[in-house]
Image (spheres, grey):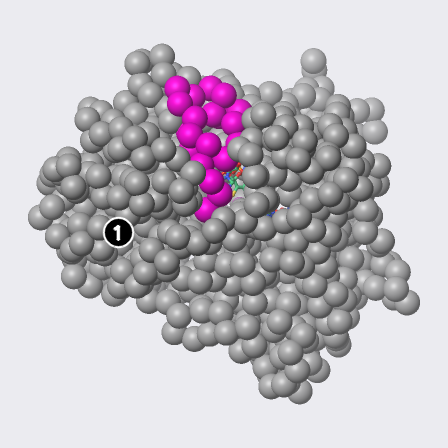
Amino acid sequence: MANDRIAYRTCPLCEAGCGLEITLTRSDDGAEHVKRIRGDRDDVFSGGYICPKGSTLGHLHDDPDRLRRPVVKRDGEFVEVDWDEAFATIEAGLLPITRDHGADACAIYLGNPSAHSLGPLLYNRSLITALGTSNRFSASTVDQRPKEISAAMMFGSVTVPVPDIDRTDFLLMLGANPYASNGSLCTAPDFPGRLERLRERGGTVVVVDPRRSETAEHADRHLAIRPGGDAHLLAAIAHVLLADGLADPGRLAAHTNDLDALAEVLEPFGPEAVADACGLDAGVIRSLAHDLATAPAAAVYGRIGTCTQEFGTLASWLVDVVNLLTGNLDRIGGAMFTKGAAGQPSTKGAPGTGRGFRMGRVVSRAAQRPESLGEFPVTALPEEIETPGEGQVRALVTVGGNPVSSNPNSERLDAALASLEFMVSIDPYVNETTRHADVILPPPSALEKSHYDLALLNFGVRNVANYSPAVVAAPDDQPEEWEILLRLAAVVSGAGLAADIDAIDDGIAAAVVRAAVRDEHGSVHDRDPDELLAAVAHRRGPERLLDVMLRTGPYGDGFGADPEGLSLDVLEANPHGIDLGPLEPDRIPDLLRTPTGRIEALPDAMRTDLDRLAASLDRRSPDLVLVGRRHVRSNNSWMHNVRVLMKGRNRCTMHVHPDDADRLGLRDGAPATVRSRVGEVTIDVEVTDGIRPGVVSIPHGFGQQLPGVELRVAQEYRGVNTNVLTDEQFVDPVSGNIALNGVPVEIAPA
Ligand SMILES: Nc1nc2c(c(=O)[nH]1)N[C@H]1C(S)=C(S)[C@@H](COP(=O)(O)OP(=O)(O)OC[C@H]3O[C@@H](n4cnc5c(=O)[nH]c(N)nc54)[C@H](O)[C@@H]3O)O[C@H]1N2
Ligand SMILES: Nc1nc2c(c(=O)[nH]1)N[C@H]1C(S)=C(S)[C@@H](COP(=O)(O)OP(=O)(O)OC[C@H]3O[C@@H](n4cnc5c(=O)[nH]c(N)nc54)[C@H](O)[C@@H]3O)O[C@H]1N2
Ligand code: SF4
Ligand SMILES: [Mo]
């Protein structure tokens, strides 16, 4: 149609990063509307794949409940104000608190969408620096922190190996359900299709999950593990590899410390010893170890189920120990390392060495939880707010997060947030969390923002770079998300309402360029910073920073050094992305950033924590434990306001095995009351043999019915928040990460 226009845009909703083809049409009043969204068949990575969420970016954009202007709370009600008034309200409300009680009195919480949006990815740091607070929290500690820590301990920086699913012969997948999630810490658009092709070429997929998930349904084998048993299982696999003479790290033996020590520390974890703890037969474990060792190429991949549990860091570490022992680390078809085009710690500085990784340098004031990667675990947040004294958290800034829904013991956190003296949220919705805010600053919609998956492309199953400009222009008075962050940073640092955002941004760009020029091993070492800045002077904000990062990155043009190299100009000319090829083998030792220049196969923290694992071998398991699940039509807590995704039967149900239903007197479709140490919910039962006896499963992200929430569609549907049940005291002590899976519960008919 004459009024139609097509735009290409990477979907920002989950980690798969699918390319979208968006058809827009102009109505008579001149406004543009999304007419259709489908998969971009020419996208170099996703090749036309799309899931039901991807086609709803237009619905999110048009959602009448999405905030278009800032709101401030007056007499308990939110009222719309202009941006100047919103920032003035923040200045008047927040500055006295940090002036009187110090910087730590204001905490910050960064949520999941801030890892999917270029503004927060590049400018959150400026806000954090301006706040100067040590009370920094993020959704990473209800998610992947154990994996980040284990990788950093082994390889010296947060460089997480990804399974080479396109070329492997054998995939052992634990605690992941990519048929629903489309993958995580493994960027693979159309993950299900890739698994199907793996099997079509004769490969094997084994899924370890207490539930017969959609992914397990499509696998060759499903092992219904006892929740929290992954570290036991993996330790036993490593034990068998070592005991049966199957361990052969190959080339990497020469680049690894403490390989010899593994046999001794894993000695207590033979298959028979762990069988009860992980609920799997010793013979099955032994043959799995043999299958992994004898497959031409094999990869072990663990995700949410292996991280958000009691032994999260051990399980995450053991995933890579098994990859290492079977000779599959850093090898085609094994667990490999992505090379992000915008650069990452493992491609900066001196190849093969670095300062390594430290954590726990400080603990949080009240809950005494360890710092890692500059943050405290969110399990500490309620206590930091509730506990009086110096350093008490009295104010909070959230950026793209909904902790009242996503964090454990949400009723306690909810009450804690209600007690804050001041709260600011950068968020498009009034939801369970932001209803406590004094000021909400709405970002532009996804269609109004440019995009580059700065974080997730570092975990790609191929090396890919893909930039999308904004699809539609935002209203004139809508600042970009990075501008909101910088202006908020200026206000909280006391620079005032009139601070020159562009001048601050110039300073940030200059700092990025100076760091690149200082890198002796980089492509622009010793060049004149002013010359480089002049070359990107036509850009501002995230585009300027991204251009510098791409040009100085591993594929970059080095500002002229390699005229064939990448720059943002090149990406702009290639709207379907640039494929930089399959993952490269043999990147070790160059990518290591450990002080020894070697892989640390047995980090001290893991050696110590194995004692805790050994102690768990003969304890009695609880009768009933809770785990989580995801559905392809929802995205954590915040897409339940999209009606097309909500249609159909109630998805917020509790899966219960028939044996447990009989024993407890529960009926399919009837409500049950579930109690944990911290809370209680009433939820409809779904009886299914697709779950291990003794385990029940409830999805997270539901329960928008709280007073003050302004999500009209979501509130029409039933649902409860499972994090009313999860327990902030039930953690992986190494990382402080929450254990959302394996929570002991009691259940009775309601
Ligand atoms: N549709 C959709 N996609 C999403 C999201 C979403 O909410 N909806 N969220 C995104 C986010 S933020 C993330 S982090 C990823 C997560 O992506 P995944 O890691 O694939 O997460 P899930 O789909 O929850 O699958 C986790 C599986 O672990 C199982 N499990 C629970 N406890 C244990 C255990 O102790 N051991 C083992 N082995 N398994 C266990 C559960 O039964 C479940 O099937 O998904 C992303 N993609
Ligand atoms: N029981 C249980 N709990 C879980 C999980 C589980 O498996 N089980 N999974 C955990 C995981 S993996 C994660 S990642 C966390 C997520 O935890 P959170 O990040 O705290 O929660 P989300 O539900 O992702 O909320 C996202 C918020 O960002 C807002 N938002 C959406 N788009 C944008 C944007 O472009 N900019 C800004 N500024 N805001 C935006 C939304 O309105 C919403 O308020 O939940 C965790 N909680
Ligand atoms: S799988 Fe769906 S939500 Fe995830 S990036 Fe692709 S289209 Fe978007
Ligand atoms: Mo996540």
**Residue 162 image position (x, y, % from top left):** 34, 38
Q: Residue furthest right?
A: 75
Taking the magenta stretch, the answer to whether it contains residue 280 is no
Compared across the picture, whether 355 is left or right of 534 comes to left
Compared across the picture, whether 51 is left or right of 226 comes to right
Mark 1 belongs to which amino acid? Pro
Q: Determine if residue 275 is in view.
A: yes
Q: Which residues are magenta?
A: 207-228
Q: Which sits in the foreground, 423 or 214? A: 214
Q: Which sits in the foreground, 279 or 638? A: 279
Quarter of the image holding residue 490? bottom right
Rendered position, 6 above or below 274: above
**Residue 84 image position (x, y, % from top left):** 75, 65
Q: Residue furthest left?
A: 254
Q: Residue furthest front?
A: 663
Q: Residue at x 32, y 35 (%)?
A: 282
**Residue 143 image position (x, y, % from top left):** 50, 50
Q: Quadrant of the C terminus?
A: top right
Compared across the picture, whether 286 is left or right of 748 comes to left
Q: Quadrant of the N terminus?
A: top right
| Secondary structure category for the residue under label 1 | helix
Task: Check disc 1 and report the residue beneath it.
Answer: 268
Q: Which sits in the foreground, 434 or 329? A: 329
Q: Which sits in the foreground, 481 or 214? A: 214
